[in-house]
Image: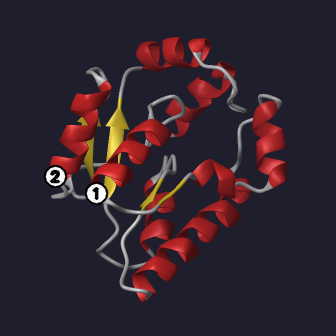
Amino acid sequence: MGVSGSGKSTVAGDVARRAGLPMIEGDEMHPAGNIAKMSQGIPLTDADREPWLEAIAARIDVWRQAGQQGVITCSSLKRAYRDILRSGHTDVHFVYLKGSYELLLDRMQHRKGHFMPASLLRSQFDTLEEPGPDEATAVSIDQPEAAIVEDALKQLNLG
């Protein structure tokens, strides 16, 4: 979890490969209307996010019912969003990829091919309710990618 540009897709992909788990890119589960809004620089509302979060929670439940684990990327910016994803269960673990606005703005200004423009980063930080240690494991993204992945694996007891 984390704001746009924090490296969720990259880190989740590495964690999933290293742990031998399936991975789903949460951005691919957004309804077309959400992607269109963000592509136009329009921040999503809670109402926009709700069906998306419910779809991700449903996928988590499929894994849970099958006795499987997996990795899903999702910004999960508010506690209420994380509560939807947990669906009352304690076996959903969040890794918060934490970085400064300046670091993330620089990353977003240099990435290519993503629908989320850098102009929406401020709205993501404004929406972000940083999780406490009771909700997520925080991993600093101000370090090399390999170190971020190692830290995440260690915190999740997967490495």
Q: Which mark is residue 19?
A: 1
Q: Quadrant of residue 142?
A: top left
Q: Which mark is residue 159?
A: 2
Amino acid on which disc 2 is placed: Gly
Image-based side of 107 in relation to 132, left or right: right
Mark 1 closeness class: few <14, some 14–19, many ≥20 residues within 10 Å: some
Amino acid on which disc 1 is placed: Ala
Task: Answer with mark 2 or mark 1, whichever residue precedes in sequence.
Answer: 1
Mark 2 closeness class: few <14, some 14–19, many ≥20 residues within 10 Å: few
Percent x, y for residue 31?
77, 56
Q: Quadrant of residue 122?
A: top right
Image-based side of 142 in relation to 113, left or right: left
Model colouring: secondary structure
Q: Residue at x 66, y 61 (%)?
A: 52
Residue contact between numbered discs 2 and 1, judged by CB atoms under 8 Å:
yes
Residue 153 visible? The answer is: yes
Separation of marks 2 and 1 at Cα, in angstroms: 7 Å
